[in-house]
């Protein structure tokens, strides 16, 4: 199994952890912790976006976060889409919900999305070999998307 090598920094957050100021926020610039996460998300060289599935779609907090982003802010940004659920009945969420959302933003969505159910995890870690292989393929697809950014820095 390939090992991912990451050089640089990462900013990881959960929309559920944004706090009480997130819910009533209707424009950026009104909540300091939210603005920090929005700025990191928009300025990232690449992002991995994942959502649990709730009633057949991504969660309301997930949608609210993207409601606060300018439609032009994610143009050409490489995005890996992922979703989780208790079973496989919502496995097409990536194709029918997430991909259209990022199409609206004109993001560079990777060809491979990653869906995992609760059965694919053991002791809190991804254990299913087929899902791990799909994740490896998806992460490998970031490479060509990031080359222009690295070349510009060099």
Image: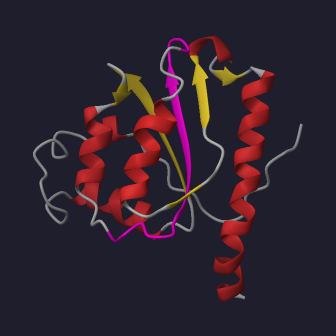
Colour convention of the picture:
secondary structure
Residue found farthest to the right: 1
Closer to us: 96 or 67: 96
Closer to us: 69 or 98: 98
From the top left corner, tell me how far across and down residue 84 is, in percent.
Answer: 52, 25
Identity of the residue drawn at 58% across and 18% down: 117
Q: Picture quarter containing residue 31? A: bottom left
Query: Quick check: 152 above or below 133?
Result: below
Identity of the residue drawn at 74% across and 36% down: 134
Identity of the residue drawn at 50% across and 36% down: 94
Closer to us: 65 or 37: 65
Query: Quick check: 116 above or below 152?
Result: above
Closer to us: 15 or 65: 65
Q: Picture quarter containing residue 103? A: bottom left
Identity of the residue drawn at 66% across and 67% down: 145
From the top left corner, tell me how far across and down residue 50 is, in percent.
Answer: 49, 39
Image quadrant where one finds the C terminus: bottom right
From the top left corner, tell me how far across and down residue 2 is, in percent.
Answer: 87, 43
* 63 is within the stretch colored magenta: no
Query: Quick check: 114 above or below 12?
Result: above
Q: What segment is highlighted magenta in the picture?
A: 72-88
From the top left corner, tell me how far across and down residue 126 is, in percent.
Answer: 69, 25
In the rendered image, is residue 18 in sight?
no
Query: Quick check: 126 above or below 3?
Result: above
Image quadrant where one finds the N terminus: top right
Left or right, 108 with respect to 1, comes to left
């Amino acid at each position: 199994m390939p090992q991912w090598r990451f050089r640089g920094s990462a900013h990881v957050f959960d929309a559920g952890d944004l706090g009480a100021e997130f819910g009533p926020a209707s424009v950026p610039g009104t909540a300091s912790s939210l603005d920090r996460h929005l700025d990191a998300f928009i300025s990232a060289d690449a992002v991995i976006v994942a959502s649990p599935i709730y009633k057949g779609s991504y969660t309301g907090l997930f949608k609210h976060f993207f409601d606060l982003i300018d439609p032009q802010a994610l143009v050409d940004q490489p995005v890996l889409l992922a979703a989780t659920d208790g079973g496989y009945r919502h496995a097409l969420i990536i194709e029918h919900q997430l991909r259209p959302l990022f199409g609206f933003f004109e993001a560079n969505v990777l060809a491979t999305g990653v869906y995992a159910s609760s059965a694919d995890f053991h002791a809190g870690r991804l254990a299913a070999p087929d899902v791990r292989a799909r994740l490896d393929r998806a992460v490998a697809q970031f490479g060509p998307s990031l080359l222009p950014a690295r070349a510009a820095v060099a």
